[in-house]
Image (tube, rainbow, N blue to C red):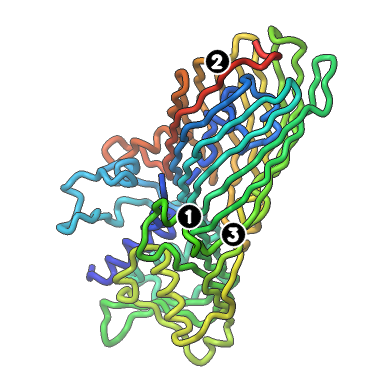
Amino acid sequence: MNEYSYRLKHYMKNLLVLGAIGLGLSSASGQNMLGISTSRYGGTNRLYINPALAADSPSRVFLNGATGNIHLNNNYVRYQAPFSLLRLVTSKVPAQYRNADGSVRFQESYTQEINDGRPKNGTLAGEVRGPAILVKTSDYSAFAVTTRFRGIVQVMGASEALLSSLRASLSDGALYGIPSRNNQLSVNTNTYAELAFTYASTLIDGDGQKLLAGATVKGLLGYNAQHFINNGLTYRVTADAATPNMPYLEVTQLDATLGYTTYLQNRGISPRTLISSDIPGIGVGADIGLTYISQYDRDSPSFRLGAAITDIGGISYKGQDYVYTSAQLERNPIRFQGSDFNNIGGTLDLAQTVQEKLSAGRTADRTRFSAGLPTSLNLTADYTDATGTGISLTYLQDLRSIQAQAVHQPTLVAVTPHFDKRWLSLSLPVVYLNRGVSVGASVRVGPAWLGTDNFLGLFGNSANGIRPRGLDVYGGLAFGIGRADNDE
């Protein structure tokens, strides 16, 4: 395999198969930290599922110090490298699997395709929930102030044929000359911070029945976003007669938009970066929710039902936005070769390389674009007996279309057996996500949380025979002060 093909395969595999590389995430998203968000003692961490739960806090005051999460999932490849995904994302890969320059020597055999003929999705997300406070103002109401920093890279609806071509570095002779039409996919990235205010109140309270309502408003600062929304693509892989070892991908039809910001180019995440007057994005968001509670007294079982819509809204960015139509390619098809991607270091470099190939010398069609939040419908149910033992059901439904210019909350269903007391929480979430099932575990002792929504994904490798499709880990420090009058 020549160096050009290796570089293209290595980069595109990580971007389109596993989510992305080189974005500089700060800590993705489970993406939902189910061990925390389903616990009654989760405090401000419950509000990201349903803001009405602020009024159900068992503590007079709840303080979140810091909570971090990293999440990866996909339905295109299974991971089977000799080192775990956890080692890969934390840069702990042993020296024998690295190149002379220190980069990971990632081989094609380290992943195995899932060939089921269905569209492919992948998400890499990182999140830090910063200082936050929740205060019960009475037995019936509460308010909270929360902060969060998020980074998400996502591929949605990619065709199996296109990903297979890229994974093979365009060098599979069986693919040559066969046109592939109407390939649709969306690639979205977004890195942003939010400051949010939540208020929740009891609408009905009587005979052991409660109905709570809550709402959150969010101010958003956007630091980085890219999107490639492809509504139709026709291409063929062709061997170059002059350089047979350098095949190329020829695009003959395209209906797409591509946009990107450059604010984080050649600069990292730092306090100065986060508060600069040059930040390219600003926006607003909102969550709304209702929760019904049935519990006759504190010594009886409780039953909770919740419904919420979260992450309504988006961010308006200053950046370059281009629109492409097939008419532009009728006479001059675009050719992509491995050498075009030699010096790519991240998603911005990729976006700029594609833009330069498609429209060299062309000015942007727009200098502003929007990036939607991962809007979702969240339905929850929980039964907990008087001993603190219970089970939760969580259903999160993505409300964005596949072709939306927005990151997505991947649709999931989770069943979470749990045990909750004031100083100890245990849970075992079982999650159906991206047409796969994972099992997690979470523990809280006092103020300290540690958990995962994909336990086997942390340790799977070719040696132990576990072939995960992602990983997930989270942890943090958070605690309640004082007891609400209506709590035990």
Q: CA distance from mark 3 to mark 2?
A: 39 Å
Q: Earlier in the sequence, mark 3 or mark 2?
A: 3
Label 2 element class: loop
Query: Residue at 66% of width from left, 54% of height from top?
Result: 313
Query: Residue at 53% of width from left, 50% of height from top?
Result: 193
Q: Amino acid at mark 2?
A: Arg
Residue 210 point in image, percent of width and height:
79, 23
Residue 356 point in image, percent of width and height:
43, 80
Label 1 element class: helix
Does residue 441 appear in the picture of this structure?
no
Height in image: 235 above or below 464? below
Q: Name the residue beneath numbered marker 3.
A: 282
Q: Which mark is residue 318?
A: none
Q: Name the residue beneath numbered marker 2.
A: 422
Q: CA distance from mark 1 to mark 2?
A: 37 Å
Q: Name the residue beneath numbered marker 1.
A: 275
Query: Which image quarter: residue 182?
Result: bottom right
Does residue 165 appear in the picture of this structure?
yes
Residue 429 point in image, percent of width and height:
53, 29
Q: Earlier in the sequence, mark 3 or mark 1?
A: 1
